[in-house]
Image (cartoon, rainbow, N blue to C red):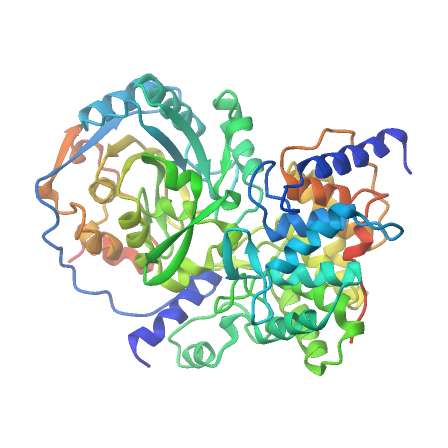
Amino acid sequence: MDSPMAEVYLQRRIAALRDWQNPDGGWGYFPGKKSWLEPTAYAILALHSQSEADPALERASRLIHSWRLDDGSYRAGAEVDDATWATALAVTVAAVRGTADSYTHASVDWLLRVHGMEGNFWLRAASLIHLFHIHADVSHQGWPWRPGNSAWIEPTAHTLIALKKIAPLEKNGELGRRIRDGEEMILTRRCSDGGWNYGAASVYNFDLPSYGDTTGLALLGLLGVNSGDVAGPIQVARRLHQNTRSPLSKAWLAVALRNYGENLPPPDNTAPLNDIALTAIEALGHPEGNFRLLGTGARS
Amino acid sequence: MTRRELLPLAGIAAAAGYASLKLKPAPPKLAAGPAGNSAVAIVRAHSYSTELAQRILEGVRQCGLNVSGRRILLKPNLVEFDPSTVINTNAAVLAAAWEVFHQLGAAQVRIAEGPGHRRDSFGMADDAGYFEAVHGLNQSFIDLNRDDVSLVRNFAGEPKFYFPRTVLDADLIVSLAKMKTHHWAGVTLSMKNLFGIVPGSVYGWPKNKLHYIGIEESILALNRQFPNTFAIVDGIVGMEGNGPIQGTPKPTGVLVMGSDLAAVDATCCRIMGVDPVKVEYLRRASEFGHVAAARVEQRCETIASVHTEYSLLPQFEQLRLTAS
């Protein structure tokens, strides 16, 4: 532990997460709000303990299980029955908690069937006949927020994390190919300043800046790639972590940089904000937090 | 390939921000529109230090808006933050609108936004100066991207679509837009500002589903879905050129207001030197709003007195009022 103050930082966040759990076992984006898969998954990861069973997490896991859909995907939350990118988070949680089952395999199959639409035949053909002028490499397949849409950095990073974590339990040859292709997709969408934003490096030849949160997530998705490919982005992430005013950016960058072995200064002992996903990510990124649960260098 | 088959590709292109579509524009033609005319107030405000609340109050009264006892949602345009330019609705305009709607007896005034690219809505609102300008907003600002949602049937051809509860519960949505050019839609004003009410938690960052539906189609569908609206367009310093993010500040010195968002946007276009009839979403908005100059009753200032020619990207030069 870095210091007693830093320890309090983590304890306050853990306590807040426990206080904010909904009666249905999940967490909303904000205290008192309906449960969603995303904050529920982050809270489970932040509270996860290898050594002891936790009834709160059992209830949370049961809620996530109740959001399973027939095709292997998961609902985004209590009020939304659409399948979304958050399916990747359910797979990550199952891998971390050791609860992967046949349905998890179906979820992996679902993730492997989903890809961004920008790399499809028609767009490439349209580009070829100059109907479109394309400024980006669309030859690599990432993952969209929702099936049938384009691929973006954040859902691709989360899916890469999930697939790498579940890979030791899967015998699907397509898994390794999609992981490598997804990593390539992230690498080709890098902004000119060296980091990543949501997934568009430029518009009409004007460069767009990178964001801290998506740079952190992209680096997490790239864990395990050749170190030469990420050396530059890690430097950018260090700079962003030092300079950003955004708590969310700082939190994701901390999780990512710690997984790359960076020794960051301990966080100031600030109180958690009323933002459950942020609080969970901040807890994950603490030196004594569960940041390693999102780390993996595994390749199938 | 048919035009219908092309639509998803256009969606991909627009969404990814790395492609341009080369299609001929449809011939300009307006629908007859609803009965009567629409009032639009153009109020001069030369700087953000002017007494903006009085200016907004004047415009609201000129448009005959009654907000007494109603739940008001102020929806600014919060896209990115770059201190060197003017991407977002200015904090002073937001603060003035907040004050005015309270003063006019609204039962509730809330400020909410769901930025299209950035996850950290609170950080963006802070960077844009909103929390400093509106006392207590850091405790009450609503991130529409992560609000609880409810299902709506048959939106833009989609059998089901989700919207934030905060938006569905509001009696009146005030679109506090910025006067800007836009590299895909030509202009972005009060109607397109409603993109920010679509929840990222369901549709992502960016809200890619809207691009697949089609930008114009989405603008129209959102405005049909939420007809109880009022617009206040911040044109004190607008943005020209490669908007909505990388354009150049354009001092214009106006606030444009009205209950008919199509009429407000059409008026803004004319102030900017853009022919609204040639802007596809506005041409089609004439089905439910007034775009034709003859159907818009200008209050306070005239268009001619505040006309400020905006520079346009080359592909939008055809939209100019003076172009044949």
Q: Is residue B86 above or below residue A270?
A: below
Q: Quadrant of residue A194?
A: bottom right
Indicate the quadrant containing the N terminus of chain A: top left, top right, bottom left or bottom right.
Answer: top right
Whether residue A93 can be seen here:
yes
Q: Is residue B274 left or right of residue A49?
A: left
Quadrant where the C terminus of chain A sits is: bottom right
Q: Position of residue B149 (x, y in %)?
A: 46, 47
Q: Is residue A112 above or below residue B49?
A: below
Quadrant in the rendering for residue A109: bottom right
The image shows residue A232 at horizontal and vertical percentages of 74, 57
Q: Nearer the viewer, residue B216 or B315?
A: B216
Q: Left or right? Give the position of B232 relative to A188.
A: left
- Number of marks present in the image shown: 0
Quarter of image, res B237: top left
Where residue A29 sits: x, y (%)? 59, 43
Looking at the image, residue A17 sits to the left or right of residue A155; the answer is right
Position in image of residue A170 (x %, y %): 75, 76
- Residue located 44% across and 67% down the image: B12
Residue at point 80% right, 63% down?
A98
Q: Nearer the viewer, residue B123 or A56?
A: A56
Inspect this view and state whether residue B17 appears. no
